[in-house]
Image (cartoon, rainbow, N blue to C red):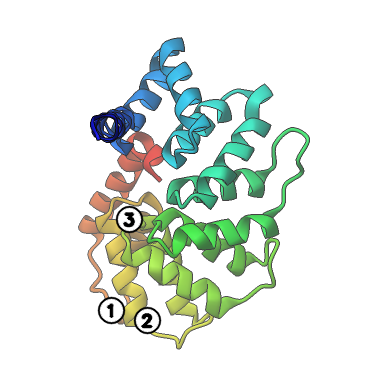
Amino acid sequence: MRVLFALLLWAGLSGCQIQHDKPTSAQIEVVGMKARQEADPHAERKLISWAGQDLPVAQRELGILYQARPKQRADALRLFEQAARGGDTEAAFQLGEMLRVGVPGVPAAPGAAAPWYAMAARQQHARAALALGLLYKNGDGVPRDEAAAARWLVQASELGNAHAMFLLSNIYNQGLGVVQDRVRGRHWLEEAAEHEYPPAIQELALTMQVGDALTQKDELKATHLMMEASEHRRNNWNRF
């Protein structure tokens, strides 16, 4: 009986220790940032160890690290796929990005990227929804489908992606895959401008220079908006 009790106690303590040693997603991401920003070999070894334990976040973070190294991009592709299959949304998006543009030894395959973008987009990943919308809009690796493009761009816009908002404004203005609706088109143009997207601010400025059915002519405001667009293009373009 004492032996059984001791074994149960040891198992309980071991379980607690294992649980304690298992890092949280936030802890893994901090180590991943340290490995990337400081080229810390100890942090990289931790990621390798955790990735070997089939922790999707660790696989994703190690993939991001390897993605920046040309000789290890094939490893990054493999890690992203492992993490995505384990349910990691960001890994699914990153895998889609790598497949779309290709890596050494693996040609670009936008069609192969589409299912991974869709996986991430269904988990409310705005950039994945934008990327998928662009694939359908341009017929890049998938059959061109204006209605599908509009649906994914609506989702990306509702999730706050300014680039998608700008594209969606043009889609509504032209009636591509949706019922033409210039009021809704203007709404998304103004939303994109509110999110400081330079092309949207510039288009709004050009509209105000001449005025239209939805906008009163205001050359002074148009000038200010054009200056604002130039400033954001110069200072904030990397955000988009």
Q: In this picture, is 227 found above or below 58? A: below
Residue at the image point whose x is 43% and y is 78% from the top: 172
The part of the image, by quadrant, that contains residue 8 is top left
Q: In this picture, is 82 found above or below 28? A: below
What amino acid does circle 3 point to?
Ile
What amino acid does circle 1 point to?
Leu
Determine whether label 2 and label 1 are within 8 Å by CB.
yes
What amino acid does circle 2 point to?
Arg
Residue at the image point whose x is 57% and y is 44% from the top: 82
- Circle 3 packing at 10 Å, graded few (<14), some (14-19), many (20+), is many
- The residue pinned by badge 2 equals 182
Q: Is residue 48 left or right of residue 211?
A: right
The circle on residue 13 is: none
Residue at the image point whose x is 44% and y is 47% from the top: 90
Q: Is residue 13 left or right of residue 22?
A: left
Q: In this picture, is 75 found above or below 92? A: above
- The residue pinned by badge 1 equals 214
> Between marks 2 and 3, how big is the CA–CA gap?
17 Å
Considering only order in the chain, which callout, 1 or 2, is on the residue closer to the N terminus? 2
- Circle 2 packing at 10 Å, graded few (<14), some (14-19), many (20+), is some
Considering only order in the chain, which callout, 3 or 2, is on the residue closer to the N terminus? 2
- The residue pinned by badge 3 equals 201
Which numbered disc, 2 or 1, marks the residue closer to the eye? 2
Q: Secondary structure at mark 3?
A: helix
- Circle 1 packing at 10 Å, graded few (<14), some (14-19), many (20+), is few
* Percent of width and height locating residue 98: 61, 43
Q: Secondary structure at mark 2?
A: helix
